[in-house]
Image (cartoon, rainbow, N blue to C red):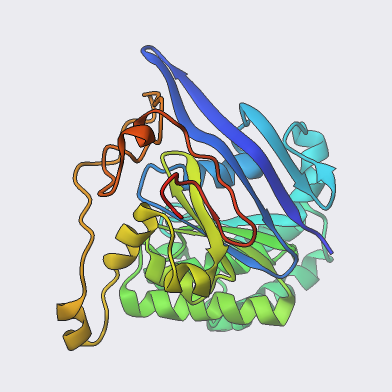
Amino acid sequence: MSELVVKNLKVHFPIARGTVRAVDGVSFNVRPGETFGLVGESGSGKSTTARAILNLIRPTSGEVYWDGRRIDRLGDGPMRPLRRELQMIFQDPFGSLNPRMTVGRIIAEPMKIFNLHRPAQRKLEAVRLMDMVGLNPRFLNRYPHEFSGGQRQRIGIARALAVRPKLILCDEPVSALDVSIQAQVINLLAELKQRLGLAYVFIAHDLSVVRHISDRIGVMYLGRLVEVAEAETLYRKPLHPYTRALLSAVPIPDPALERERRRTVLHGEIPSPELTYPGCPFADRCPIAEPRCRQQVPALEGGEHQVACLLAN
């Protein structure tokens, strides 16, 4: 069974004033059949991490292994066969589909690229995939503009499934959808995971979204992982003050509990990734920071529950 291993991944972009550290030393693994949730504010480096894993962006340093093989330095030729096993669902269901192609062609295109099935059989496979993701196969010859946002995201899912991948990186696949449609897409992904034995890296900025689909969750802040734990452990006993702040912002359906709950309000915006910090990057926004937090960089430490905070214990 295939496993994804990411070690000390860094993606830095040179600019006129210095360097943007979009991803600054991220390490995690995704086990076969597991969903690893990656959460954090916009600009924390989640999407850049996903693109670097797939070599859509060249990492500055670090290592990425798939099925025991290092892939972060592979060229386009050697990387191409691996793209059958590693697929991506993009955030924007409106911009990720070719408006000049019918749904049938969009889903069948990956099969053609990887020379899967005979031409006549590809149409039958596209019909099967549409049915699998909850789309009416009669719409095979329609164009993307004739579908709603949720339906377009289902088309993107069907396209990713067309080459029978083992791991799918889901880059905020529900953030552009209405709440009711979000639940439908998340339930679909969970069902496909069980049915096909898929593994996911599920990226979102909303902890309430990833809770229902993730086995483990990594919380990112300013290009770094600050906490990694099993989903229920993270929600029951968050150790990092940033994770606590994110969880305190998740609405509770019970009005009585919502009124009694104590909120953790973070002041200011996420700092610029252009800047360097002698200590913890979260120190200036942290409600419990001490002077040493601004002088010492905390390492991500622990066993099954890892945290990068000098005050976690």
- In this rendered view, identify the residue nearer to me: 155 or 312: 312
Q: Quadrant of residue 157?
A: bottom right
Where is residue 207 drawn, in percent x and y? 40, 65
Name the residue at the left extreme: 259
| Number of numbered tags placed on the structure image | 0
Task: Determine the residue positioned at 51% across, 75% down.
Answer: 232
- In this rendered view, identify the residue nearer to me: 17 or 129: 17
Q: Is residue 142 visible?
A: no
| 205 to 267, vertically: above or below | below
| 304 to 301, vertically: above or below | below
Name the residue at the top extreme: 16
Task: Determine the residue positioned at 84% across, 64% down.
Answer: 1
Where is residue 18 drawn, in percent x and y? 41, 14
Q: Is residue 226 visible?
A: yes
- In this rendered view, identify the residue nearer to me: 191 or 311: 311
Task: Determine the residue positioned at 70% across, 66% down.
Answer: 162
Where is residue 189 drawn, in percent x and y? 57, 74
Q: Is residue 17 left or right of residue 227?
A: left
